[in-house]
Amino acid sequence: MKRRLALMALACGMVPFVSTTSPAQQPASACDQPGDMAPAQLYGLWQLTLWPLGGQESSPASTGALLFERHPEYPGSVRGNLKRSSQGNDRAALVSGDVTHGEFNLDESADGVNMDAVWEGNATPSGCGQELRGIRRPAQGSKPDEPVMNFVLKKSPGWR
């Protein structure tokens, strides 16, 4: 009886195709190209590393996380929360931005009103939409002693 049901399901096309290739084994061409990255691909939790210009990624000045969600007021954009370490204390900020043609732009604000920093970067070609790299710089008129820093954002496992 079981065999007959299995044959009927197969004959009717009811058995889903199962790939024998795991995602890790798929060729690099299976990745979206950075220019094809959609804003919705930013949704989720990202791990952050910041280091000074001329410094080393392996010696970060700050680490933390960003949680991106759909922006409620601007379709095609993201809004989220940033939490990161800083010398002597932790920082929290609201963020909003987007990704267009693989270019990542983000505004950071500690109070939700005044802009403290701007982020500009790109999706990395080898990152399959799971890594963004660029520069975080103080916003015009913000704290002048805030350094310009490199950043890398890596999407946390499970958020695809």
Image: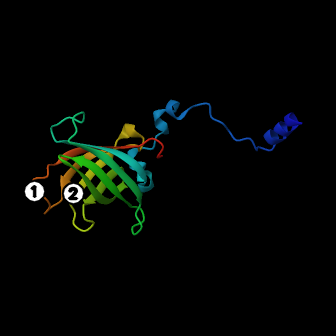
Q: Nearer the viewer, residue 12 or 139?
A: 139
Q: Position of residue 60 (x, y in %)?
A: 22, 39
Q: Is residue 12 visible?
A: yes
Residue 111's place in the image compared with 118, above or below, is: below
Q: Residue furthest front?
A: 88
Query: Which class describes the residues within 10 Å of circle 1: few (<14), some (14-19), or many (20+)?
Result: few
Which residue type carries mark 2? Ala
Instruction: Name the residue: 40% across, 63% down.
Output: 71
- Quarter of the image that includes the N terminus: top right
- Numbered mark located on residue 117 in the image: 2
| Residue 27 relative to residue 45: left or right | right
Q: Quadrant of residue 68?
A: bottom left
User: Residue at the spot x=74%, y=41% of the render?
Assistant: 15
Foreground residue among 97 and 62:
62
Tally of numbered tags: 2
Residue 75 point in image, percent of width and height: 42, 65
Q: CA distance from mark 1 to mark 2?
A: 11 Å
Q: Give the residue number, with chain letter if any, for mark 1.
A: 144
Amino acid type assigned to the residue bearing label 1 in the image:
Pro
Is residue 126 shown left or right of residue 86? right
